[in-house]
Amino acid sequence: MLGLALARSAAGEAELLTLATLPEARRRGIAWRLMQSVLERTWQGDAQRLVLEVSAINETALGLYRRCGFEEIGLRRDYYARDGKQDAVVMAVQRDQNVAGHLAGAAESCPGPTEA
Ligand SMILES: CC(C)(COP(=O)(O)OP(=O)(O)OC[C@H]1O[C@@H](n2cnc3c(N)ncnc32)[C@H](O)[C@@H]1OP(=O)(O)O)[C@@H](O)C(=O)NCCC(=O)NCCS
């Protein structure tokens, strides 16, 4: 196993709980592919949006989520206690803005990483 994503869906809303790739397997597009799978499975259910929280200093994750269509919808101050207090950015992607590309198997709404 090189990475994992964990999400749950209930009452019309899905939440990404965990996304991680092994340090030695990073920057190969694994997290992006995991997010493609999460989005596809989410839209196959009844969720109208997928939400997540991410540390405000986690630029890699923030960039990945933005490329997958997520937008910032809130900020939780001092949310994370590790390494001193850090804010959490709350992000969401709406089903009606994202679903077409995923159900059609197209990549426009979640473009992959640019090849180096
Ligand atoms: C955030 C995380 C999941 C990203 O995993 P990843 O598999 O490296 O992600 P990807 O490869 O899909 O994309 C990450 C970056 O690699 C780049 N990348 C991907 N393939 C690449 C390649 N072949 N050449 C160069 N760069 C590449 C992407 O463009 C992206 O660039 P950026 O860092 O400038 O934004 C990983 O760093 C991680 O597990 N971090 C610790 C846990 C964490 O922070 N989880 C998210 C919090 S909710």
Image: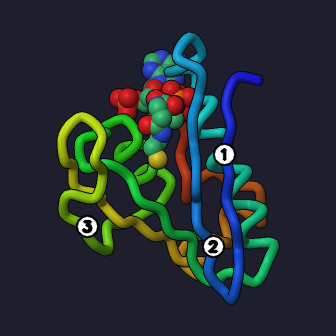
Q: Is mark 1 within 8 Å of ligand 1?
A: no
Q: From the viewer's perspective, is residue 116 above or below residue 102?
A: above
Pointer 1: what residue?
5
C-alpha distance separating marks 2 and 1: 13 Å
Tell me how far mark 3 sits from mark 2, CA to CA: 19 Å
In this picture, is 72 found above or below 60? below
Q: Earlier in the sequence, mark 3 or mark 1?
A: 1
In this picture, residue 12 sits left or right of residue 41: left
Name the residue type under label 2: Ala
Residue 113 locus on image (x, y percent)? 49, 33
**Which secondary structure, mark 1?**
strand
Task: Specify the farthest residue to the top.
Answer: 24
Mark 3 or mark 2, whichever is nearer to me = 3
Label 3 – label 1 distance at C-alpha: 22 Å
For image coordinates 30% across by 40% down, the residue present is 82
Q: Secondary structure at mark 2?
A: strand
Circle 3 or circle 1, nearest the eye? 3
Q: Give amino acid for label 1.
A: Ala
Q: Secondary structure at mark 3?
A: strand
Kindly indicate the quadrant of the structure image that contains residue 5: top right
- Choose between 77 and 97: the one closer to the eye: 77
How crowded is the residue under tag 1: few (<14 C-alpha within 10 Å), some, or many (20+)? Answer: some
Using the image, tell me which numbered label, if any, was put on residue 76. Answer: 3
| Quarter the C terminus occupies | top left
Residue positioned 69% across, 55% down in the render: 38
Give the mark nearest the N terminus, 2 or 1: 1
